[in-house]
Amino acid sequence: MVTQPVLQRWFPWTTWPWVFNAPMFTVANGKMAAGVTKAGGIGMVPGGIDPRLESPHIAALDEHLKVAADLLGYDATSSEPLPVGVGFVTMLGTPEIYQARAIPVIAKHRPAFVWLFGSHPSAYEKLIPVFHAAGRDWGMKVFIQVGAVDAALQVARAGADAVVAQGSDAGGHVWARAASIMTLVPEVIEALGNADDLKTREIPVIAAGGVVNGNSVAAAMSLGASGVAMGTRFITCPESDALPSVRRAVLNSTDGGAKTIVSELHDIIAGYPAFPNPYSARAVVHKGIIELENGSSLEDVTEAYQKAREDDDESRLVTFAGTGLGLIHDPLPAGEIVGQVTADARQVIQLLKTT
């Protein structure tokens, strides 16, 4: 008897190869997640960065999940989970804050899984049990996103059900020192498989970073990934909450390795919360980062950024995006993206089998 792949068992509505939309804050939403799930992918909504009482992020999460449930026709009385996930950027929250603020919303909507990212890996030793306990009745899984092999082992030992291996091509917040998925994914898989204390567990590895089309999905699967997460590809879809300027920056850019840059200064310029070590961020090259390289002060660049926002000067805006943006040409709906990339990936894989 052939054993069903773990992601198929966890998420029975899905089709192979398994595609997640990244839970990008200010970009992903309930419409996007529902579109991805309806197409046989694994949709996600953002849980926000700040779970504290004074923040609107948890209220926004409640609305995202309600929209997804309505669009999917989810029966809240069912014993089955809502077929979407929630992604939390965890650096500003403690287990106590998540327990008080986020868990009631999680319990209300019963998502299939949560996806955590943004803290030092050691923080997940206390966060993972909070989410496992909250979702025990419906089998909610906990995914942790990391950018290094040691971190993958650390979060797996802390109880993560799945590891998201984020490579250096990813957009937005990434590990400052990371390999591409070309070496990161197979080494994470090898390390998890060779760890004596993890041998009894089946821990899927999701590839993230630089995956934008069928070819890259097929490549990630050939590296041993159980599934893939795509972020930048979904920025331009009609369901996205991305600003028009962000959509234009993605669609008008080419040569992503040269036209994007990794720097912790993106957050400072834009006034975003500072991510802890070991994180940095990849964004489209903008005037501010060029001026800093040429000797301008951070204060001057930050002031110019604020004025540019007032004047609608897009040349200074900070647009988080990955190196695959040069391969994104059409702003397709989320479900069509999933259908296209999975069909193309299957075709590539079949072609490789027969040649």
Image (tube, helix red, strand yellow):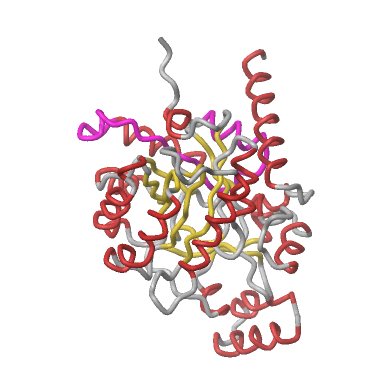
Residue 22, given in percent of the width and then of the height, sits at 55, 51
| 217 is within the stretch colored magenta | yes
Residue 9, given in percent of the width and then of the height, sits at 43, 28
In-image side of 12 versus 214 (left or right): left
Does 24 appear above or below 158? below
Tell me the quarter of the image containing the C terminus: top right
Q: Nearer the viewer, residue 349 or 58?
A: 58
In-image side of 337 versus 68 (left or right): right
Residue 273, given in percent of the width and then of the height, sits at 46, 75
Q: Nearer the viewer, residue 263 or 4?
A: 4
Q: Nearer the viewer, residue 192 or 292?
A: 192
In percent of the image, x 69 and y 29: which residue is there?
343
| 277 is within the stretch colored magenta | no
In percent of the image, x 63 and y 80: which residue is there?
294
- Residue 336 visible in the shown view: yes
In-image side of 316 versus 101 (left or right): right
The residue range painted magenta reads 194-222
Residue positioned most to the left: 197
